[in-house]
Image (cartoon, rainbow, N blue to C red):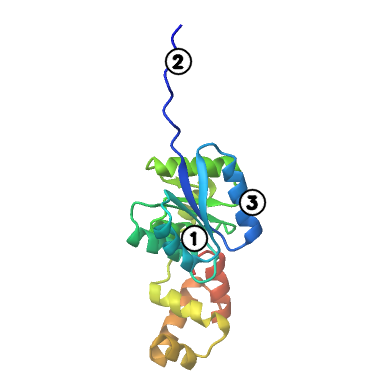
Amino acid sequence: MTDAPDQPPVRCVRVLLAEDQSMVREALAALLGLEDDIDVVVQVARGDEVLDAAKATPVDVALLDIEMPGMTGLEAAAVLRRELPALKVVILTTFGRPGYLRRAMESGADAFLVKDAPAARLADALRRVLRGERVIDPTLAAAALADGANPLTDRERAVLTASADGSTNAELAARLHLSNGTVRNYLSTAIQKTGARNRAEAVRIARDKGWL
């Protein structure tokens, strides 16, 4: 009786996990650790720590939350795409907003999933992006198509975001190195595009849609 041929070793997906809430981060790491072929090898709590961590520890996939201090997951994804283009990026978020999906794809993300998705779906997404596939939550994909593209330009988005703290036009102009008139024009256009009555409402609408 001959011995069965040796099976090739299972390819282990090495994951960098970036999530600012420690309980959520630890729970995700524990769930993914139950998979035989997935290994969370490094964890960070800030978006601005992602690139250094990815350079210091060889990983296949970066699993990024959107809302993090220092740098958002979307911003970190764009940095990784520029600095480490071979690294796969998966965005995981509580906020199922179509605008976030569009921005994630623009930043070079390979997958976009919401946190209430089953753990098995997340594990499958990690394997699939490593095979070169793009994975998008189907409900969000349909909503993004129905919602249309983000109407705000980069400048309008930057000025509207900066205005969220209630700064005056003069304060925004000084901070963003723009003239008062330019700031006023950007805010006026952003208010019109969002269908809002004022800048505060424009900020709320844009955030709800994931445009900021």
x, y percent for residue 1: 46, 6
Amino acid identity at mark 1: Tyr
147, above or below 202, in the image: above
Amino acid identity at mark 2: Ala
Residue that carries the numbered disc 3 in the rendered image? 27
x, y percent for residue 28: 60, 50
Is residue 149 in sight in this rendering?
Answer: no
**SS state under label 1:** helix
Q: Earlier in the sequence, mark 1 or mark 3?
A: 3
Q: Residue at x 56, y 38 (%)?
A: 35
Q: Residue at x 46, y 40 (%)?
A: 12
Residue that carries the numbered disc 2 in the rendered image? 4
Circle number at residue 100: 1
Q: Earlier in the sequence, mark 1 or mark 2?
A: 2
Q: Are discs 3 and 2 less than 8 Å apart at CB? A: no
**SS state under label 2:** loop
155, above or below 1, in the image: below
Mark 3 crowdedness (10 Å alpha carbons): few <14, some 14-19, many ≥20: few
x, y percent for residue 132: 37, 43
Q: Are discs 1 and 3 less than 8 Å apart at CB? A: no
Q: Residue at x 58, y 63 (%)?
A: 20
Q: Are discs 1 and 2 less than 8 Å apart at CB? A: no
